[in-house]
């Protein structure tokens, strides 16, 4: 994400490398390039100018520490100001409902922004990470596909979906859903609503009536980040009418410019609370301004990477693998199990983007979620005995594995060699000392 603006800001900051000090002249050139990068990212001129003016004032007003180069100081200042621009810190969703009642979350936005998918993702997030009992409400009565879509997603994540066939009043449906959720002891009710291709009075009136009637604890505006400045304008229109509590940016994984993420909080003075980063139900992240600023500046996001790893980390499994490594019993089944844990962490492109400097190494390289398919197909073509006993793989077995997986014998040989090297390295680490322990997850 944000490949375009990242490369342009990095190029702008590069002009200060090797400089002995920050002066009016070299800072002016850098700030000018940063402003151009922001404008190219679809940030409005007034916001881009105000941002760069703040960066310039901060740079000229700060004493340069002898051990820090001006270029490094400038990166630090730009990081600080980007973080401020996007909201400074993460803001949690409000789930404090009225006594004896479930918390109500109202979802608003244009058609095609990803409201229905986000509603299901949020339900999945609250169920699995907040231990909440959630009910989804199909409030889009105009688009039949929206109801069936939500029902399908609800089945997928095992969350009940409230619908009422033949009822075309979304306010009445939502009220009945809340009563039903209370009777069933649910903690949270998420109300998906109708959208339009553009802002119109009928839609605004309907969402206004829903908010007034339900008095939700949280109203979230969902917007497609790839629409850039249009996203900001739509966010303003909705906020003026319903005064929502937070913004959700969808399709952030496909956004190369980053204009919406950078400016929407500034434009409406409402926090970005969640970002959608893929199609899967777990492809939803809490928005952290400081981490996003780091990614924009090519500094990665190690904290988020570790958090995702912790969610999939199985301590008991790790102890078993360590024991197997020490006794040289680590096999293809163990390897395949670890590949599965990595895949659960998210898309490979997104994971690599969290590693500092990796975005530069993988620039112009196509990275898909099918990266493990050849490995999985080769291991899948092995017999159970072969998977548990890697040393038994002779020439004829390799030929059969190649034929069964549709790979060449050279690919099979290369994979087995890489597996042996990985196993040797892991065994060395394990026998010299304990495997690095991840901090336990907070519950």
Image (tube, helix red, strand yellow):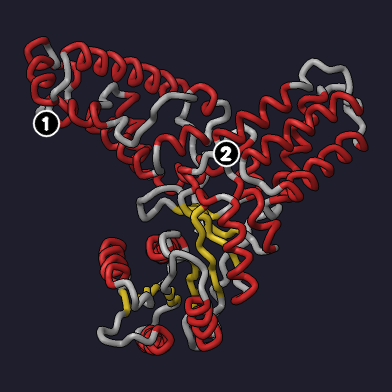
Residue receiving disc 1: 384
Which of the marked residues, 2 or 1, is nearer the chain's N terminus? 2
Viewer-nearest residue: 119 or 382: 119
Q: Is residue 396 above or below residue 301?
A: above
- Is 403 situated left or right of 307 in this image? left
- In percent of width and height, residue 438 lies at 49, 40
- Do labels 2 and 1 touch, CB within 8 Å? no
Give the label, 2 or 1, closer to the camera.
2
Question: Is label 2 in a helix, a strand or a loop?
Answer: loop
Q: Is residue 338 above or below residue 279?
A: above
* Quarter of the image where one finds residue 265: bottom right
User: Measuring 46% from the left and 20% from the top, which residue is drawn there?
Assistant: 432
Disc on res. 301: 2
User: Can residue 215 be seen?
Assistant: yes
* Distance Cα–Cα, label 2 vs label 1: 39 Å
User: Measuring 56% from the left and 78% from the top, which residue is drawn there?
Assistant: 217
User: Can residue 118 be seen?
Assistant: no
Disc on res. 115: none
* Quarter of the image where one finds residue 37: top right
Q: Is residue 371 above or below residue 194?
A: above
Viewer-nearest residue: 318 or 6: 6
Question: Is label 1 in a helix, a strand or a loop?
Answer: helix
């Amino acid at each position: 994400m944000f490949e375009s603006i990242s490369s342009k800001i990095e190029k702008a900051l590069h002009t200060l490398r090797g400089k002995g000090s920050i002066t009016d002249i070299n800072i002016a050139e850098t700030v000018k390039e940063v402003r151009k990068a922001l404008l190219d990212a679809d940030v409005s001129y007034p916001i881009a100018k105000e941002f760069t003016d703040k960066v310039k004032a901060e740079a000229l007003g700060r004493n340069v520490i002898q051990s820090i180069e001006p270029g490094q100081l400038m990166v630090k200042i730009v990081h600080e100001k980007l973080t401020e621009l996007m909201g400074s810190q993460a803001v949690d969703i409000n789930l404090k409902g009225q006594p004896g009642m479930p918390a109500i979350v109202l979802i608003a936005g244009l058609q095609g922004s990803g409201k229905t998918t986000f509603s299901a993702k949020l339900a999945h997030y609250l169920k699995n990470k907040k231990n909440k009992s959630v009910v989804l409400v199909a409030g889009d009565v105009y688009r039949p596909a929206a109801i069936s879509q939500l029902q399908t997603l609800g089945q997928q994540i095992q969350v009940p979906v409230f619908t009422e066939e033949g009822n075309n009043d979304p306010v009445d449906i939502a009220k009945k859903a809340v009563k039903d959720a209370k009777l069933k002891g649910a903690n949270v009710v998420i109300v998906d609503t109708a959208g339009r291709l553009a802002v119109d009075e009928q839609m605004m009136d309907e969402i206004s009536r829903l908010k007034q009637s339900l008095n939700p604890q949280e109203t979230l505006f969902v917007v497609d980040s790839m629409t850039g400045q249009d996203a900001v304008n739509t966010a303003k229109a909705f906020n003026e009418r319903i005064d929502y509590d937070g913004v959700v940016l969808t399709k952030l994984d496909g956004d190369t410019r980053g204009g919406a993420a950078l400016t929407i909080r500034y434009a409406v003075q409402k926090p970005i609370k969640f970002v959608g980063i893929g199609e899967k139900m777990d492809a939803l992240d809490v928005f952290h301004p400081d981490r996003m600023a780091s990614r924009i500046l090519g500094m990665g996001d190690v904290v988020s990477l570790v958090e995702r790893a912790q969610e999939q980390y199985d301590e008991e499994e790790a102890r078993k693998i360590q024991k197997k490594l020490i006794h040289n019993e680590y096999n293809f089944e163990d390897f395949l199990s670890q590949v599965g844990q990595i895949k659960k962490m998210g898309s490979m492109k997104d994971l690599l983007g969290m590693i500092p400097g990796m975005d530069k190494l993988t620039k112009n390289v196509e990275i898909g979620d099918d990266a493990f398919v050849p490995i999985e197909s080769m291991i899948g073509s092995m017999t159970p005995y072969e998977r548990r006993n890697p040393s038994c793989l002779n020439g004829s077995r390799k030929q059969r594995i190649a034929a069964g997986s549709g790979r060449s014998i050279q690919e099979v040989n290369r994979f087995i060699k890489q597996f042996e090297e990985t196993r040797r390295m892991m065994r060395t680490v394990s026998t010299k000392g304990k495997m690095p322990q991840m901090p336990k997850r907070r519950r």
